[in-house]
Image (cartoon, helix red, strand yellow):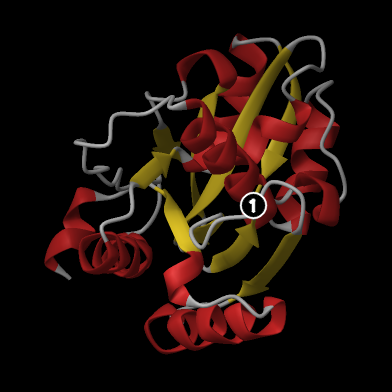
Amino acid sequence: MTDAQWLLALDTSTDWAGIALTDGEVLAELNWTAGRRQTTQVMPEVERLLGTVNVTAAQLGAVAVATGPGSFSGLRVGLAIANGLSIATGIPLLGVSTIELTIHAWRDLPGMAIGVVKAGRSRYGWASADAIDEPLTGTIGELIEFVRVHDASIVLGELSEEDVIRVRELTDVIVPPTPDRLRRAGTLARIGWERWRSGGFDPRTIPDPVYLHRTEQHS
């Protein structure tokens, strides 16, 4: 066991935040509704999680961060922490799509999977499994129409309970219950760990955030 065996995962794409640690076998994670409080909550929770697992910053060998789609205020928190750790310690930084995290556990299910994140003001951002890098934004009605046109089999992610009912009533798609459809920081840790250990990333590349609303950058 080396001193740099652990990977830290950070997901602050939306109000639903998560952090995780893994060494490929042990996994510790925390997922919670941070709301607009990521700036004050995330780093203290990272320090607490490190202490819980009895891991120091010197034992981190890589950091993985969710790159969106998400909100400007949310994404900048995770990316700032991840970039700071990477620069200060010289460890690699890996970016992973938030949509990929959302659908990852269901990727082997037959049919098309669609991952959804909240965009605020009763709007959503989403993308299908075959077009993760091409997210769209819109109302619940536009999401439902997208589901119909693409003959999706399952919708995952951040949907209000009211909109879950609407999707189920107006389409034949599967929408799992809340705990099963929300993304987990542990999934980000797993994807990041596998890419880090296999060398499946470019260490020279700095992950770029994908914002749901460009206007948020000026708010």
Which residue is pictured at 83% across the width and 56% down the height?
179
Q: Residues within 10 Å of mark 1 (few under 14, many from 20)?
A: many
Q: In this view, does 104 lie to the left or right of 141?
A: right
Q: Which residue lies furthest to the left in this view?
A: 218
Residue sitting at 44 percent across and 74 percent down?
57
Coordinates of residue 199 in the picture (x, y in percent) = 43, 27
Q: Is 79 displayed left or right of 61 in the figure?
A: left
- In the displayed structure, 89 sits above or below 205; it is below
Name the residue carrying label 1.
158
**Nearer the observer, 17 or 52:** 52
x%, y% of residue 28?
72, 66
Q: In this view, does 27 lie above or below 154?
A: below
- Which residue is most to the front? 1
x and y percent of residue 2 in the render?
A: 55, 56
Locate the C terminus by quadrant. Answer: bottom left
* Label 1: which secondary element: loop
Report the front residue among 19 and 87: 87
* Residue occupying the point 40% across, 52% down: 70
If the image is split into quadrants, where does the N terminus sit?
A: bottom right
Give me the residue at 18% from left, 56% from top: 215
In this rendered view, identify the residue nearer to me: 95 or 215.
95
In the image, residue 133 above or below residue 156: above
Looking at the image, can residue 184 be seen?
no
Along the viewing direction, whichever of 33 and 165 lies nearer the viewer: 33
Amino acid, disc 1 = Glu
How far across and down, in percent of the image, does residue 130 sit? 53, 13
Residue 78 appears in the figure: yes
The number of discs equals 1
